[in-house]
Amino acid sequence: MIDLKKLQKQVYANKVAKGFNVTDVHKEFCLLYEEVAEANRAYYKKLPDIGEELADITIYLLGLAEILKINLEDEILKKIEKNEKREYQRKNGILKRTKDA
């Protein structure tokens, strides 16, 4: 399995080494949003670089998590467990949560 904490630190170290932003959290969210838009565009236009765009999203997310001192791997595992315990029911064609974790 991939060690996301190690990748977070590697992404952050690369940002520092290259002189990229590591202090303006708002800017990082905006850049992450831009990468999501690029991935959506690649998907919509059936471009061959959709995988690279998804990798960019992941890299920005890992960097942001490290800037915020969040262990993203732990948070993902907790959220997956929480989602697995939720229950849903389709009512009038709309899927609604009926039981929260």
Image: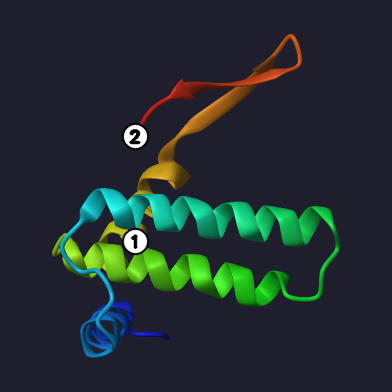
Q: Is residue 71 visible?
A: no
From the top left corner, tell me how far across and down residue 19 is, in percent.
Answer: 24, 82
The single residue placed furthest to the front in the displayed view is 19
Q: Quadrant where the N terminus lies? A: bottom left
Instruction: Pick whichever, 68 or 4, lies toward us.
Output: 68
- Compared with 39, 12 (above or below) is below
Mark 2 residue type = Ala
The secondary structure type at the circle numbered 2 is loop
**Image-based side of 70 in relation to 84, left or right:** left
- Report which quarter residue 51 is drawn in: bottom right
Q: Local crowd at mark 2 within 10 Å, few (<14), some, or many (≥20)?
A: few
Mark 1 residue type = Leu
Q: Residue at x 16, y 60 (%)?
A: 68
Q: Local crowd at mark 1 within 10 Å, few (<14), some, or many (≥20)?
A: few
Q: Residue at x 46, y 46 (%)?
A: 84
- Compared with 11, 65 (above or below) is above
The single residue placed furthest to the right in the displayed view is 46
Q: Which residue is mark 1?
A: 77
Q: Residue at x 34, y 34 (%)?
A: 101
- Compared with 50, 34 (above or below) is above
- Report which quarter residue 8 is drawn in: bottom left
N-terminal of the two: label 1 or label 2? Answer: 1
From the top left corner, tell me how far across and down residue 73 is, in percent.
Answer: 30, 68
Q: Is residue 76 visible?
A: yes
| Badge number at residue 101 | 2
Is there a contact, CB below 8 Å, between mark 1 and mark 2?
no
